[in-house]
């Protein structure tokens, strides 16, 4: 039996990682303009993705996309999707 706190696969690990980055925003009451400011602050921070050797930053549009995907679909919305041009 698998530990319930261990991701089942890499996609779930990525979804959990993304939720940890934007998670604090999900539980805050944000006034007009505060989301943009909070996302800009997050975009300046460095994070180490699962299985990565070096940390990286994320752009405001990427963080915003994750924020709204999580708000709409929960953890499933944060799973990586295959590229549409493949």
Image (tube, rainbow, N blue to C red):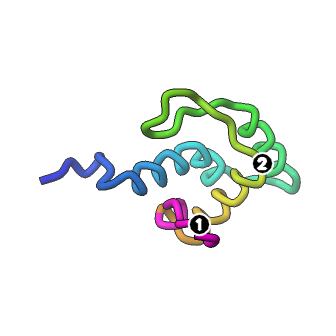
Residue depicted at 49% across the width and 45% down the height: 17
Decide: is 11 above or below 22: below
Residue 78 screen position, x and y as percent? 53, 60
* Residue named by callout 2: 60
Q: Main secondary structure of the magenta part?
A: loop
Residue depicted at 25% across the width and 51% down the height: 4
Per the rendered image, the range of residues in magenta is 76-86
Indicate the quadrant where residue 83 lies.
Answer: bottom right
- Mark closest to the chain's N terminus, 2 or 1: 2
Residue depicted at 29% across the width and 47% down the height: 5
Residue 60 screen position, x and y as percent? 77, 48
Pair 2/1: label in front: 1
Q: Please tell me the numbered disc located at residue 83.
A: 1
Camera-side residue of 71 and 76: 76
Residue 84 magenta-highlighted: yes
Q: Residue furthest left?
A: 1
Decide: is 73 above or below 41: below
């Amino acid at each position: 039996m698998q530990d319930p706190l261990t991701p089942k696969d890499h996609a779930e690990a990525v979804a959990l990682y993304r939720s940890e980055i934007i998670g604090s925003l999900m539980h805050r009451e944000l006034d007009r303009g505060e989301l943009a400011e909070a996302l800009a602050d997050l975009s300046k921070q460095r994070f180490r993705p699962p299985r990565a050797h070096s940390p990286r930053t994320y752009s405001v549009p990427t963080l915003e996309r994750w924020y709204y995907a999580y708000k709409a679909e929960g953890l499933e919305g944060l799973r990586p999707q295959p590229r549409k041009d493949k």
